[in-house]
Amino acid sequence: MPVFLDSTAPGFEAQFKALLSAKREESVDVDDTVAAIIADVRARGDAAVIELTARFDRLDLTPDTLAFTQDEIDAQCATVPAAERAALELAAARIRAYHDRQRPEDARWTDDSGAELGWRWGPVASAGLYVPGGLASYPSSVLMNAIPAQVAGVARLVICAPTPGGAVNPLVLLAARLSGVETVYRIGGAQAVAAMAYGTQTIAPVDKITGPGNAFVAAAKRRVFGKVGIDMIAGPSEILVIADADNDPDWIALDLLSQAEHDESAQSVLITTDAGFGQAVASAVDTRLQTLERRAIAGASWRDYGAVIVVRDLGEAAALSDRIAPEHLQLCVADPDALLAQINHAGAVFLGHWTPEAIGDYVGGPNHVLPTARSARFSSGLSVLDFMKRTTLARMTPEALASIGPAAEQLATSEGLEAHGLSVRARLERLNR
């Protein structure tokens, strides 16, 4: 059974804090194993990647077969049914249109001193996109990672998508094609992250690595950060639904289950102003769990981490939501915009009764790679900006240096950095001749 909380009950604050602090991330200690894998790939390159792929993915490769050939990709794409192709093409078009609007603009201006200042934006040169294999092989993740990178202007994009036992998901390869990615390596795990970060004889290193993965992939991304950039260390999926009584309990139950079915460690929380409605939603969840295909996974998630919280009013709901800082937030209330104005922390917000979170996973347009584990308090979802760098620009005229240079010289002296001050003083003295 999920946890039922009432904000008016004694002990609520302690119970809510316990809910916030529940550890859902995988507790298995993988860091030592990952460190050894990365060291092995750095030392032996292709040979290590091939050996580790045979051990973990039961797939024998050679340097020539690490990547899919274009003919192999063509053949796999040809097997995708027309309806699935059309859906993927629609998703790709909508995701691209949304992310096209995120491209930042360069800027230059001259300030009151006469100094010219500004910035320019440019893409990282290369990016590696990790796509999980096996049961978690999602073509939508290819689109969400690759399209922002392509919109940013990244010149070289590669994908690592493991194929355990040689099993290939044609939709993943089609998504790569629709996203403009030609190179897809059939490797995964920490060895794939290491190969993209440090390079091997066959795989050229990249500048940034993005994409979801298991505990080994997450640990590897954490370890290679600094050598390359990464997007984030994402934890299990989560959804918070704030709903009043004017909702179909079955709809809300399905919204909660849409994240619970991802992972036994996922979390689904309902906040409502009506206790009876909360009970009705919980009953609807139980009914759906009797027939849901992934009921074992969703049932464990709902049992161990699910929660129904009854609050006095929507203002209190907004305050609790900010403390949760959810990855996904659905506002199923009469005036979602008014409630949104009271909320500051969420990865993605879905407004109104007709906007299920699942739309955002596929065809809404905004990115579905989002901060988890309360990190929406200080971070954002994946965007075009994650694949770009901002370079600042400055140009001093003699007049501008005469105006602001003495202050720079003074601060350099205060900090005890003599050469800093002298580099300014030498120019000021030339001006005074």
Image (tube, rainbow, N blue to C red):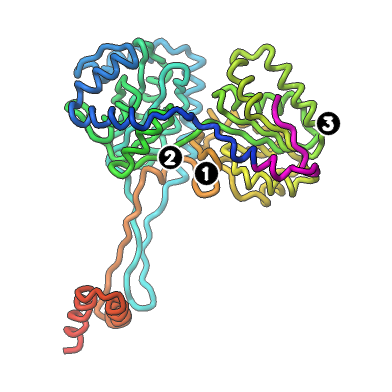
Query: Residue 109: where, in percent of width, then height?
Result: 37, 67
Q: Label 1's element?
A: helix
Look at the image and say whether residue 6 sits in the magenta stretch.
yes
Identify the residue at horizontal 44%, vertical 13% (top origin): 80
Report crowding for label 3: few under 14, some 14 to 19, many 20 or more residues within 10 A (C-alpha). few
The numbered dot on residue 375 is 1
| Amino acid type indicated by mark 1 | Ser
Q: Depth check: 317 or 104 in front?
A: 317
Spatial separation of the CA atoms under disc 2 and disc 3 = 39 Å
Which callout, 1 or 2, points at the residue further toward the start of the chain? 2
| Amino acid type indicated by mark 2 | Met
Report crowding for label 2: few under 14, some 14 to 19, many 20 or more residues within 10 A (C-alpha). many
Does residue 179 show up?
no
Identify the residue at horizontal 41%, vertical 15% (top origin): 169
Spatial separation of the CA atoms under disc 1 and disc 2 = 10 Å
Query: Residue 87: where, in percent of width, then height?
Result: 51, 21
- Mark 1 touches mark 2? (CB < 8 Å): yes
Provide the residue span drawn in magenta: 1-17
**Residue pointed to by mark 2:** 232
Whether 130 is drawn above or below 69: the answer is below
The numbered dot on residue 291 is none
- Left or right of 376: which side holds 49? left
Q: Label 2's element?
A: loop
| Amino acid type indicated by mark 3 | Gly
